Amino acid sequence: MLYPKMKKRTYDDYTVGWVCVLDHELTASRALLDEEHDPLPPRENDDNNYILGRMGKHNVVIVFPGFIGTTSASQTVTNMVRTFRKIRFGLLVGVGGGAPAPPSHDPRKDIHLGDVVVSFPRDGHGGVIQYDMGKWLEGGQFASKSHLNKPPLVLVKAIKHLQSDHNFGKGQMWEYMDGVAKSNLPALEGFGFPGQDLDQLFKGDYKHVTGEHCSSCAAAQLEQRAIRKSTRPEIHYGLIASGNAVMKSARRRDELRRKEGVSCFEMEAAGLMDNFPCVVIRGICDYSDSHKSEIWQPYSSVVAAAYAKDLLRIIFPEEVQRTPPAQNRFSQDSPSRERSKGSELAHSTDSELLTRLAELEMKNKGLEEAVTCRTNESMGLKQKLAALEQAYNSQLLPRSYAYIPSLESPAFGLLSANDILKIIKTDRDAFTQGVATSKTIPVL
Ligand SMILES: [Zn+2]
């Protein structure tokens, strides 16, 4: 039998970049491709992993980096848009931690595990803030860095359209999710709905007791929320907070929700938003508190991917063609140009360097995770102390460390949680002097 000769695909046939980080996110996204294409030969200076395929009417590049965190996601996307020059925009598809508001009368408005949060421009910002970067205001208040770049018009229009489709019960993401649930692929085992009884939101001041799950945590400490009639996920549109560390503090979560209006926390978007025209789509897999577990990650990855596929469904390829290639934004924003834009962006570049230094330092000392706490010489003593307290109060892990780099001086150090506690509780003045001179910061 003779097969018709297929047109050979090239890098330039792909127009949508789809960014995943975790294995679950990749599996769920790959499962939703309508057709998978043969890989293209790897290019020099590009170590990324790619899965190529078609989703609806669009040729999509699914890319996945090897590490979690904003710095590596940024490098991954830089490589992708250099290799695939016709990519017009990106979808950041995966899981995130929810920032639920106090229970409302309408259970559909409450953020539940398995729901989706989509970054959407509002009040002059582009839908994403970087909560571990920003500037100190008079009086010691910290203002998170807001990413003003909005998603490209084609995505903003499509999101509004899809919101209306869903209100009229016209979306197709539920069918896409059903397709995954009915699949017999071994790779998709365990990607089903975990069950409403495993969706537990504890009161903000109640900490996780012990173990991987919440079997030892007190049921009396659960928030009482109205029960939804349907297990179908709800879609929330709002502000996503991005940072280099995992958010595991209900106190800090609630503070950022109240002050900034944050609906979700994640770890990749901030490294990309300045250059990459994209939208962030997060399936909620935990409540960003100490009760965090991984049970919901597979299912929430599917929900996020199903929403992203539904979004592509209503975008015409002609609209994509009319959108400028993402690569243009990258070549316009060379590092030297970025510095000339102002001190905030210059700070951002320094900060990436310092984050890498911190990672190296942590690796050398065998630490698993650190709270990043940045100070510089222009900050007053009160502000430096506030930065340290903020880092400590985040309580990301029992083994938490604060990293105190100084932008104007090479001196930096890692403080153990115990040291910080001691300093904050008993030796405040001595520490304040230590920060001021950058000489007496104890290094582990
Ligand atoms: Zn718990």
Image: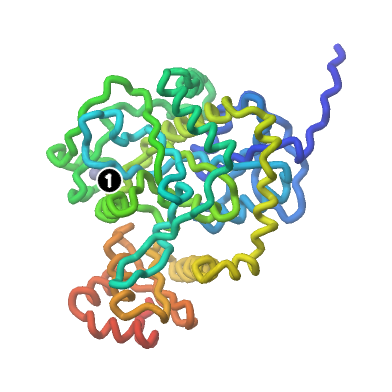
In the rendered view, tell whether residue 417 sits above or below residue 219: below
Does the beta carbon of the residue at mark 1 sit less than 8 Å from ligand 1?
Answer: yes
Q: Is residue 106 visible?
A: yes
Q: Of 76 and 153, which appears nearest the observer?
A: 153
Residue at image coords 42%, 37%:
283
Asked if residue 314 is positioned above or below residue 363 in the image, the reply reads: above
On the image, the x and y values in percent for residue 227 come to: 23, 26
Q: Quadrant of the N terminus?
A: top right
Which residue, given by chain and number where applicable, does mark 1 sit on? 291
Q: Quadrant of ligand 1?
A: top left
Measured from the top left, where is residue 387 in percent x and y? Answer: 33, 70
Find residue 349 and report its horizontal and vertical position in percent. Answer: 55, 67
Residue, far top: 1
Q: Quadrant of the C terminus?
A: bottom left
* Identity of the residue drawn at 24% across and 71% down: 421
Residue sitting at x 59%, y 69%: 339
Classify 255 as above or below 3. below
Identity of the amino acid at label 1? His
> Residue 330 occupies which quadrant of the picture?
bottom right
Nearer to the camera, 111 or 299: 111
Asked if one can make out residue 53 in the rendered structure from this viewpoint, the answer is: no
Q: Residue at x 83, y 27 (%)?
A: 7
Compare residues 443 and 82 and report the one nearer the observer: 82
